[in-house]
Each structure stands twice: as C-alpha cells, then as structure tokens.
Amino acid sequence: MRPEEERGLKCPYCQGHEFKKIISRVAYHVSERDRLENYDPRAKKADGFYKDTRNIGLHAKWRAKRMGVDLGASFEEKVDKLRTDPGSMIRDSEGDI
C-alpha cells in the first residue's frame, strides 16, 4: 500500500489512525542440493514430509550420492514426472497388467 493510501485509513472499531505493520507468512525455497545435504533418513518425519511431492526420490538420490552412483537422466526424468504428477505412475503401469 502506498503512503498516500495509508493516510485515509482508520480502524473500523475505534476510528483511530495509528497502525502497526505486521509481516505476513513467509515462504522460502530450499534447493535440491540443500535438501539432499540436510536429509537424514533416521530422523523422525512429520506427516507433511510424506505429503510434500518434492520428497519423492529424495532417499534414492541421497543413497546413490553416498554410494557414488550416478542414477542418470532417465531417473531424474521419472522423479520429475512423479513430483509434478504423482498419479502418473499408477496410470502408466495400468497398461502393463
């Protein structure tokens, strides 16, 4: 809000003109590299961990990195597809039955 818009504001309850600005909820991005470096498979996971599609493939990537294995572009493509559309794995496999 611009300062000139703030001048005309008043509290609907007391009609006062003194306000304090508060900071709204903030979100920040954590890179894939940082997510791998901070991943601890032994740590207790909150329910939100399992609902966050960014965590699909995280353990496999973490394990491969520890073993010095390159999972390749095909793996990355599959993980990206699952992260954007988790149901795709089920739909794609239905033709195999």
Image (cartoon, grey):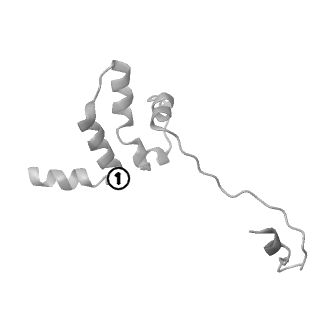
Task: Relative to 32, say whether 6 is above or below.
Answer: below
Can you say whether 38 is above or below 30 in the image? above
Q: Position of residue 80 (x, y in %)?
A: 33, 45
Q: Position of residue 44 (x, y in %)?
A: 50, 35
| Above-or-below relation of 9 to 85 | below
**Label 1 secondary element:** helix
Residue at the spot 33% in from the left edge and 32% down from the top edge:
60
Q: Is residue 92 left or right of residue 96?
A: right
Q: Residue at x 46, y 32 (%)?
A: 33
Residue shown at the point (34%, 38%) measured from the top left: 57
x, y (%) of residue 45?
48, 39
* Quadrant holding the N terminus: bottom right
Mark 1 residue crowding within 10 angstroms, few (<14) / some (14–19) / many (20+): few
- Number of marks drawn: 1
Look at label 1 and name its amino acid: Thr
| Of 18 and 60, the residue lying toward us | 18
Look at 46% across and 28% down and name the residue there. Answer: 42
Inspect this view and state whether residue 97 appears.
Answer: no
Residue, far left: 97
Q: Looking at this view, is 58 or 19 the one in front?
A: 19
Residue 64 falls left or right of residue 29 = left
Residue beneath disc 1 = 84
